[in-house]
Image (spheres, rainbow, N blue to C red):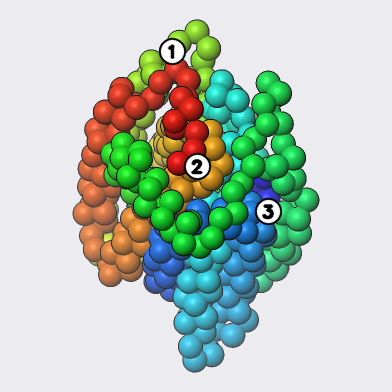
Amino acid sequence: MLGFVCFMCPGLFNALNGLGGAGQVDETTAANANVALYSCFAGMAFISGSIHNMIGSKMTLLIGTFGYTLYIASYLASNLHPLTKGIDNFSIAAGAILGICAGLLWTAQGSLMLAYPTESQKGRFIGIFWIVFNLGGVIGSAVAFGQANSVSNNTYIAFIVLTFIGTILSLFIANPNKIYRTDGTKVVPLRHPTWQAEITSLGLALWADPMILLLFPLFLASNWFYTWQFNDFNGALFSIRTRALNGMIYWASQMFGSIAIGTLLDWPRLHRRTRAVIGWVVLLVFVMVVHGWAYHYQKDYTRDSLIANPERIDFSTPGYAAYIWLYIFCGLLDSMWQTACYWFMGAMSNDPAKLAYFTGFYKSLQSAGAAGIWRVDAELLPYMNIFASTWALLLGGLFCAAPVLWIRIRDHTEMKDETL
């Protein structure tokens, strides 16, 4: 159920964003809207764990879904009234509102997804969620596929209706205090303390478990690469209909990546720390392979060269297959990176309240990085600079996280890690 809520809301947002410029011919407005979105997301996510623990998972999830409908509606308004003064500001404002809502949605999602499984099922649960969630990106991209020069009004309307259904669907999520895990243990009920206690606990989460700080560069990198992948590769090189096809294949590949690394991280024959180290090595190999491959293409085009030669690659263009295989590997890396981040956090606690803080930190850092790099892209920094920063940050995040996996992750979560 949680997967289907995210299928309808952030899944369709991903499909639209993955087209480059949210399906618009001019990508600048979408880039600026993403700056507003991720800036507000970063600020909200840092405190959303406290809000989640005050009002509960279900209400947090419900409020968090509203912004997606408004955001997509802003692009419909741009299509219907392209000459209206200030219409671009509507998209930017809608992005800011969505950032606030998304901070709440993803905190509730992370807390529930990591609290419900047993310790031996966390990778599987994350993988199942990621498959259902990414179906939104696959189907959304399939809907957009076939558009000639820009996404049609009917496509935006269909996305608006589906995201609103996602909001309604969140009403049917069960409350955590009614959930028993498959081994018969009860999920720790959420505490509803005072705001003062929640703010204190937010700082205590860092003080009591400082190893989480070493995961911050890993979190920062986790949305950074979207800018190069979506705008500076898919959006820069391909026609609109081919962007949609690429997006559909990208999100489909994520289903395989998430379940593969989730299964690896849950492999019962190995100690949990050993699984964590193997997962780290797999990520390192994929980062090097994907970006070494991508450099082969990136060195041959710049912003100026694309202006001088406006012809874009179509799926019927000879040599297209090599590009889409790279994009498939980008999708695999993305899903494995996100799944591993959640699994690392889930290996540190089983308590929904503490996990809400951790996922709040995760989404806050993730969004801060995304806001910065989308702004850089809107300022038209060279593609190669953005690509190099992406590669460097991914490597830096992995090496900073290595001590956490070896020192902090144990075969079983101890009682002192269950709560604050």
Q: Secondary structure at mark 1?
A: loop
Q: CA distance from mark 1 to mark 2?
A: 22 Å
Looking at the picture, does residue 308 appear above or below residue 198?
A: below
Q: Secondary structure at mark 2?
A: helix
Distance between the alpha carbons at the discs numbered 1 and 3: 34 Å
Residue sitting at x 28%, y 64%: 376
Circle on res. 377? none
Bin the neighbour count of mark 1 within 10 Å (Cα to Cα): few under 14, some 14-19, many 20 and up.
some
Residue extending farthest bottom: 85
Q: Label 3: which residue? A: 58
Please state which amino acid type lies under the numbered disc 3: Lys
Q: Nearer the viewer, mark 1 or mark 2?
A: 2
Q: Which residue is painted at 45% across and 17% down in the image?
A: 411
Amino acid carrying label 1: it is His
Residue 162 picture location, percent across and down: 72, 59
Tag 3: Cα neighbours inside 10 Å, few (<14), some, or many (≥20)? Answer: many
* Vertical relation: 269 (above or below) 141: above
Mark 1 highlights which residue?
A: 271
Quick one: label 2, few (<14), some, or many (20+) residues within 10 Å?
many
In this view, the residue farthest toward the top is: 269
Visible residue check, residue 254? no
Q: Which residue is mark 2?
A: 355
Percent position of residue 183, x then y? 68, 21
User: Please, what is the three-letter code of the amino acid marked with disc 2?
Assistant: Leu
The quarter of the image holding the C terminus is top left
